Amino acid sequence: MEILKYSFIALISLAVLLILVFAIRSRKLFKTLLLNAVLGLGALAVIDLTAKWTGVYIPVNYWTAGAGGVLGLPAVFGLLISNFIFL
């Protein structure tokens, strides 16, 4: 289980680094990071609002909202995948 925990930490670190690199290379740092955060939080909200009909549920708390806001869509997809793996 320790290996899985450290692999998730490594993947999250890599995702943050890639998002920052792409945002800096686009020369529109603020716009890119803001769009990434809005898309991530929007996807998290859609999943939360449709949980009754789809049966897919991600609990919204400070950690999931922070991950969706900082990492965007890749974090939301990661939360979905980890939800299916561990439940």
Image (cartoon, rainbow, N blue to C red):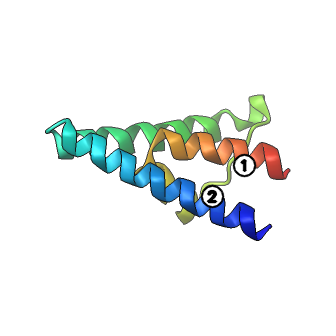
Give the quarter of the image for residue 53. top right
| SS category of the residue bearing label 2 | helix
Residue shown at 20% from the left, 35% from the top? 26
Given the current orientation, which residue lies at the most extreme left position?
27
| Residue displayed at 52% across by 36% down | 43
What residue occupies the far bottom of the structure in this picture?
2
Is residue 61 rendered to the left or right of residue 21? Answer: right
Q: Amino acid at mark 1?
A: Ser
Give the labeled residue for mark 1: 82
Question: How far from the left and from the top, in percent, is residue 32?
Answer: 26, 39
Task: Tell me how far mark 1 sits from mark 2, CA to CA.
Answer: 10 Å
Q: Nearer the viewer, residue 86 or 56?
A: 86
Q: Are marks 1 and 2 in contact (CB under 8 Å)?
A: yes
Residue type, mark 2 in image: Phe
* Residue 47, numbered label: none
* Residue 8, disc: 2
**Helix, strand or loop status at disc 1:** helix
Q: Position of residue 38 (x, y in %)?
A: 37, 41
Q: Of residues 85 and 43, which is closer to you in this image?
A: 85
Q: Residues within 10 Å of mark 2 (few under 14, many from 20)?
A: some
Figure check: 9 above or below 27: below
Residue at image x 75%, y 70%?
2
Q: Is residue 12 above or below residue 73?
A: below
Task: Pick the residue in front: 53 or 31.
Answer: 31
